[in-house]
Image (tube, grey):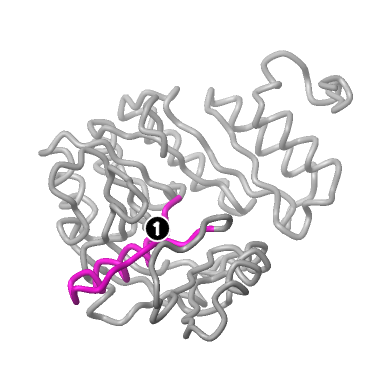
Amino acid sequence: MPNLALMKLAAWHINQDDEVELLREGYHAKLKNIDKIYVSCIFPQNVPAVASMLSWFKGIPVEYGGPGFDKPSHLPEEVEHIRPWYPLYGVDYDMGKTTWGCPKKCPFCVVPNLEGDFQEHADIEEFHWPGHKNVVLMDNNYLYSTRWEETLDWINQRKMKVNFNQGLDLQYLTHEKADVLRRTRLYPSSFKKPGVSFAWDLMEEEPYVERGIKILKDSGFRMWKVQIYMLVGFNTTFEQDLYRVDKILGHGLDPFVMVYNHRRDDPQLLRLARWVNKHLYSVVDFKDYHVEDEE
């Protein structure tokens, strides 16, 4: 996934008539006499690779940002609300957030610490590149927005495809929202086969999930399009995780298991993730599934 912060910084510098280059691991800089380097890191596990790459650029001022460094992801106002320079990564789709933060305070999530309380953030026109037909919306809880319909109407009027790269929250789904979503060209990040993802992270969310799925069905939603992201191993037992998977399969939906970061060494959870995410549930019951069967 292209880094949105770097594309905005690139746009700002290009507007100042500066030359900009994207540095990646294994690439050599083409620009000479570099004045400054910006580093944005999303995941902590990538920090060592960043440090190794920067060892080639001693003496050059470096500015760090992003959740990988446990730093707030806010850019200066004049940079935050600039249209990203998509050619930096050569992407042909829009990327951005119409909202900031999240109304929930889920104990496993870094968003409240990084972005704070929920707020409306930007119009979609702000990050739209003329000619682009696809858009990735990176909102953490899009359906909570008071402007959800305005944004989707703008997208639908232009017959654009949209990918919500965070699972939509069934707690805030209504019949009205489901009806508009049903008429929207929803796609995963590849923008090839239609689809949309919702989320079920905590056991106590079950009533909202059941109500949301019923709303989707009542609205005539094509259920084969629907995937459910499922966090496992955080504060649930294994039996509860398997129960949730069975529930989603029982509704004819496509579950996708994500193992909590601090439980990635749990063989039982990894076994469940492989069984679910490789769709092996269609050929073998979980109790009869063994990882060795694939080897």
Give the side of residue 110 with respect to residue 125, left or right.
Answer: right
- Camera-side residue of 104 and 21: 21
Residue 11, quarter of picture:
bottom left
Q: Locate residue 206 relative to residue 75 in the image: left or right.
A: right
Residue, disc 1: 141
User: Which residue extends farthest top?
Assistant: 283
Q: Position of residue 18 (x, y in %)?
A: 25, 73
Quadrant for the C terminus in the image: top right
Task: Name the residue located 31 percent from the left edge and 58 percent from the top edge.
Answer: 96
Residue 6, magenta (yes or no)? yes
Residue lying farthest to the front in this orientation? 32
State whether residue 268 is above or below residue 205: above
Kind of residue sitting beneath label 1: Asn
Q: Position of residue 48 (x, y in %)?
A: 68, 68
Q: Which range of residues does the magenta coloring cover?
A: 1-24
Left or right of residue 246: residue 92: left
Q: Nearer the viewer, residue 267 or 251?
A: 267
Figure quadrant of residue 107? bottom right
- Tell me the element at label 1: loop
Count of marks overlaid on the render: 1
Within 10 Å of disc 1 (Cα), the crowding (few <14, some 14-19, many 20+) is: many
Q: State whether residue 279 is above or below residue 266.
A: above
Relative height, residue 115 to residue 210 (above, below): below
- Which residue is painted at 61% across and 44% down in the image? 230
Q: Where in the figure is residue 105, as x and y percent of width and height? A: 52, 70
Q: Is residue 1 left or right of residue 173?
A: right
Residue occupying image coordinates x 46% and y 63%: 29
Residue displayed at 33% across by 62% down: 7
At which x and y percent is residue 260? Answer: 70, 54
